[in-house]
Image: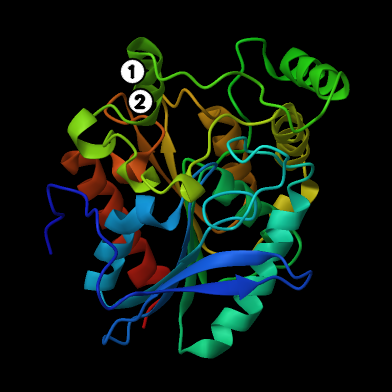
Amino acid sequence: MPTPDLLPTQIPADARLSRWRAPDGWDHRRFDWTSPGKRGRVLVQGGRSDVVEKYLGVIEHLHRQGWSVTSFDWRGQGGSGRLGRTAGVGHADRFDVHAHDLRAFWAGWVVEGEGPHVLLAHSMGAHFALQAMLEGFEPDAAVLSAPMVRVRSPLGQWLGGKVAGWMQGRGEASRPAWEFSDESRAVEKRLRRLTVDKAGGQDSRWWEVDDTLRLGPPSWGWIAEAFRAGAALVRDARLASISVPTLFLIADHDQLVDPGAALKVAAQIPNAEVVRFGPESAHEILREGLAVRSRAFAAIDQFLEAKAPA
């Protein structure tokens, strides 16, 4: 089926929003869209500040291929509460808890329906997925879009991490690392880092009309943890023991995460494949213009047909 020109903007009428509680009691917002087809089941997980609605284009494509699709908002964002004192700030002390949430959710989810069972995760979500795989998490296949192994920093990784750690310790770790601006030039700069094609992915964050879903800048605690966790991930010897068939979608001109670090991680995973995108794509590969999305979806479909056959 051809990829639609426009991304969907409405929760499907036959989809269901519900709640899921982690083992420690944390309440998460959950989405399910069951397909009458028997292709299998996919868990779709977004990145920092993302919510289920943002990936309706990905979800719709998978559903049209016969997959039943589930997603949940990560702890600390969307409809799954906040980890800091201020609702508009994205805070996290450690990323381990998110990887544990993923593994706990998966354990209950896989017994709810027939497989194969596949994970598709973007950016920060892909980082959590890699952490979980290091701890024995084994989906039948995984697709990682623009994985956040290391965040970009104009100061470089070592100095950037040192500055973030210093700022984290100077005050409340959950305070924002910068002020969110609605000034037109600031908005345009943010959007250019997300997608090259304005019509494809820069849709004014329509999904955040509900204030309870909105999330602004990260905290200094989140940034410090991103540097720490990224440095640990890229040198983790356990990457060589991951047996999950994994497809990496990497944007070489990504301005938010370091594509070179993602390539280094992919090279250490024995059953990994890589599809790279050039200047036609920014960070949000799966929300880019039609040509990029079509190529990405074709790569995903081909990979899953080979690695997670029905």
Q: Please name the residue shown 13% across and 54% down the image.
A: 4
Q: Amino acid at mark 1?
A: Glu
Q: How many marks?
A: 2
Q: Is residue 156 visible?
A: yes
> Do the residues under discs 2 and 1 have CB atoms within 8 angstroms?
yes
Query: Along the line of sight, which residue is nearer the eye, 102 or 10?
Result: 10
What residue would you read off at disc 1?
Answer: 188
What residue would you read off at disc 2?
Answer: 191
- Percent across and percent down for residue 148 are 57, 39
Report which quarter residue 276 is drawn in. Answer: top left
Does 300 sit above or below residue 50?
Answer: below
Report which quarter residue 203 is drawn in. Answer: top left
- Percent across and percent down for residue 265 are 62, 42
Does 99 sit above or below residue 280?
Answer: below
Q: Left or right of 48: which side holds 3?
A: left
Q: Amino acid at mark 2?
A: Leu
- Binning the other alpha carbons within 10 Å of mark 1 as few (below 14), some (14 to 19) or many (20 upward) gives some
Where is the C terminus found, in terms of image quarters? bottom left
Report which quarter residue 138 is drawn in. Answer: bottom right
Q: Is residue 241 visible?
A: no
Does 106 sit above or below residue 191?
Answer: below
Does 205 sit above or below residue 11?
Answer: above
Query: Along the line of sight, which residue is nearer the eye, 180 or 284?
Result: 180
Q: Secondary structure at mark 2?
A: helix
Q: Please name the residue shown 55% across and 42% down the image.
A: 48
Q: Left or right of 168: which side holds 55?
A: left
Q: Please name the residue shown 22% across and 54% down the image.
A: 8
Where is the N terminus found, in terms of image quarters? bottom left
Q: Please name the residue shown 85% across and 17% down the image.
A: 166
